[in-house]
Amino acid sequence: MIVVARTNSGEKSREPIAITGVGAVSPLGHSFEAITDSLLAGRSGVRSIDPGAFARESHQFAAAVDVIPAPPDGICQIDAEGFAGLTRLEQMVISPVSHAVADAGLAPHRNGLRIGLVLGLGAEQLKMWELDFLDGGTQVFAPSPTDTLVHRVAHLMHLRGPAVTVAAACASSGYAMALGRSWLSAGWVDACVVGGCDVLSPTALAAFYNLRALSRRSDDPAKASRPFDRDRDGFVMGEGGACFVLEPLSAARRRDARVYGELAGVGMSSDATHMVSPCSDPTQAARAITQALADAQVAADEIDYVNAHAAGTPVGDAAEAGAIRRALGSAVDRVPVSSTKSMSGHLVSGAAAFEAVACLAAIARQAVPPTLNLDHPDEQCQLDHVPHVARERSVRVTASNSFGFGGANLCLVIREAA
């Protein structure tokens, strides 16, 4: 249970929520160490791919995952052979959940704990129907009720707490992290597995292409994603995601678990302006950031790194720069900002969780990952950028932004655990 104490002033204080397990599948690696190495080395996971049945171009640039790791032995009710027979989306969900639980050392204690599961997954059923349709099936014309992935995963993993799926576009996995934190604070669960993922699909690639949200570059894949650069022309899609185990810090210390950091603050807002076009007014995005700082009880000048949502769209990047400047005020010119989407591509539903890994990486290695391809910073995006190469510096408190279609704004404050 969460211990709620009272300070000398009479205000309630929450017990810190620790991040004790990390599982990931990504274009930049599948372990925390491998992803950290790739981010700080400035490696790009973007390459040329076949965009599939509905594409207008024969090839597009994207950050794809080649191999999805099977669950560790003994963690879930499925062996390597059974895992290989699952759909790509099922594999992309089960793998990071199982590795996060194993990494946290919770597997032997599952029967005695209420472990919740919150996953950010967008268009889950659509993607399942699409895969069936491309194989000659007809489910898309006559869909039948099926178990959701989150409940199947909870069954396979013996997780006996509540389980739910969250869909908030590009902020989905961040919303999942926020919801899991609130469950812990309410005392509804003893631990919670949170995060999310996404897969590249012909429909998604065609839809974002037709919306003119994707970069149309065709020269060098590694140079296509250009957040904050004056020559940016859209984002590059990626796939994968990350999952984390959240639990009270005191419980983690009792188990002598590795604590990667603390999920210290959450801020949310909605632009409520347009279903797909980014809002050019930074007011509500800035509000999400300031709420997260207030929730974490940190001042703007205590932030050591901002992982920007910055996907590389002309309007979105400029609006976010304005939101960061408004939220951080006079401290903004002293806070380094970077977009790791320049390396990983945009993982859509999995983006927020993967970028939380980037924040933990910065804390672990005391270095800020760079923004690749930031050759000519846009004058509308005036920030303390980290172009091309990582920057060594003290990193204790980080903020990570995620802004989704429909105006879903989210900021997470992730800091070094006390």
Image (tube, grey):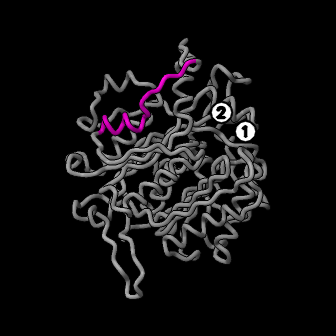
Residue at coordinates 78% horizontally, 61% vertically from top-left? 380
Q: Amino acid at mark 2?
A: Phe
Closest to the observer, 166 or 244: 166
Whether 307 is among the magenta residues is: no
Q: Amino acid at mark 1?
A: Ser
Give the quarter of the figure containing the C terminus: bottom left
Mark nearer the N terminus (1 vs 2):
2
Closest to the observer, 366 or 131: 131
- Looking at the image, residue 137 sits to the left or right of residue 313; the answer is left
Vertical placement of 356 versus 65: above or below? Answer: below
Residue 224 percent coordinates (x, y):
69, 40
Q: Which mark is residue 244?
A: none
| Count of number-bearing discs | 2
Whether residue 40 can be seen here: no
Q: Which residues are magenta?
A: 142-157
Q: Label 1's element?
A: loop
Residue at coordinates 57% horizontally, 50% vertically from top-left? 171
Residue 389 percent coordinates (x, y):
59, 56
**Pointer 2 residue:** 61
Q: Which mark is residue 215?
A: 1
- Looking at the image, residue 11 sits to the left or right of residue 330; the answer is left
Marks 1 and 2 sit apart, C-alpha to C-alpha, by 8 Å
Residue 288 percent coordinates (x, y):
61, 63
